[in-house]
Amino acid sequence: MFGLAALALCGCAASEKHIELELWIADFNQDTRDLIDGELVPRFEAAHPGVEVNTQYISWTHLDEKLTISFAGGVAPDVFQVGAEYVGGLAYRGMAAPLDEYIAEWGQADDYYPASWNTCVYQGRVYGLPYLSAPRVLIYRRDLLSAAGFDRPPETWEDLAEAARRMTVKRGPVFEMAGMNVAVSWQVFVEFLWENGGRIFNDEGTRSLLDSPEAAEALQFYVDLYHKYEVCPTAGMPQAGGAIPVFASQRAAMEINNQFGLYNVRKYAPELLPQVGIAPTPVRKTRVVSVYTDWLAMSPQSKHKELAWELMTFLMEPENLAAYNATLFFIPPRRSAVAGAEFMQENPELQEFVALMDRYGRSLPAIPEWFEIRTGLQRAVESAIYQTKTPEEALGDYSRELDALLAERVGETGEGSE
């Protein structure tokens, strides 16, 4: 259906009349804009005479609103970038075109890391192509860990707590060195939850599983890092000079972070790099590295779907994908892009992120309600860590809210999500 003959016809049509494609990018900086506007789009347009790509750079703050308005007005962009939580909602609302037929003919899906690829899958259908990935791992100081009596990174939750306790230095209530730097975040909780064999909801996406013992144990351990073991401050460590992140300012011995933890060290304390180690987050029952992937979707409203697909696969060519990720210090979600990326070779520590992502990576399960879920989960996590509720109370209260939220969709359609 979408073979060479069809593409040849597209080329003929494009040469006979002016065609505009609209591309929305949400992950960008000035280097990204220079790459896309100055190199990638001109090359694509040169290969497709008569086609003009209009690129808009949309902040995450305004992306949802602009997408909603553009779809309601029938003027949605042909190709647009979205985040790790989006696939269920977009597919459910008919705001992303299924790409299975295109992908089957393209034949390059196996080149993507599974955790990245799964971000774009909802109920067995594929709705996008992964554009960048960020796996969360344990980043630690080898020298401090060795001085604390450990010859390897923490393997278990108990190891993590003990190592952090030994490396914590306080003067009264003030942290001089935090054993752990951990954000108060639903994403950190989800990683602990998965490590403990727990889940947020059942396979059908119709019932909350946050009232389980596994969930309560995971949140309790998270709370204990702050209050029982006292290895990280609830308010966070003050940043050096008001701007340098905590680990890079050498005021934390370990942190759970994506590759930006490494980027910050390279930027602010490059002399520290030989002492920085990368490891999976310590295991409880199941080894997991959570992977957050942003991706490109095609609008069902596009009047030029074959050309939109051509644009998507052009941006996904290994050299182009690597160049895009290099501008932002993200990890290319495609094996051939990683292998050929100069910035990956120049930053060998990133190869450790890739290996862990490939071996242990897990993406968020697809469900239409993710935006409401992440808000509710954040409230529950905060209420437990700031001790306005016990972990059991926080998760029990939110679990009932989540059941009600999921029941609304089930009542509308009679179906759940995978």
Image: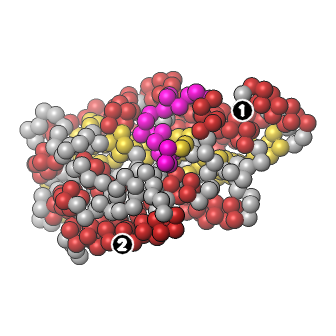
Where residue 352 sits: x, y (%)? 34, 31
Where residue 243 sits: x, y (%)? 39, 56
Q: Secondary structure at mark 2?
A: helix
- Of the residues under marks 2 and 1, which one precedes in the sequence? 1
Highlighted magenta segment, given as a residue range: 106-124
Where residue 418 sits: x, y (%)? 43, 51
Which amino acid type is shown beneath numbered disc 2?
A: Glu
Judge whether residue 47 can be spotted in this image: no
Query: From the viewer's perspective, is 332 left or right of 388?
Result: right
Label 2: how many Cα within 10 Å (few below 14, some 14–19, many 20+)? some
Q: Nearer the viewer, residue 359 or 208?
A: 208
Magenta span has 327?
A: no
Query: From the viewer's perspective, is 45 left or right of 82?
Result: right
Judge whether residue 155 can be spotted in this image: yes
Q: Residue at x 24, y 49 (%)?
A: 197
**Badges 2 and 1: C-beta atoms under 8 Å apart?**
no
Which amino acid type is shown beneath numbered disc 1?
A: Met
Rendered view: 166 above or below 75: above
Q: Mark 1 = which residue?
A: 1
Q: Mark 2 = which residue?
A: 401
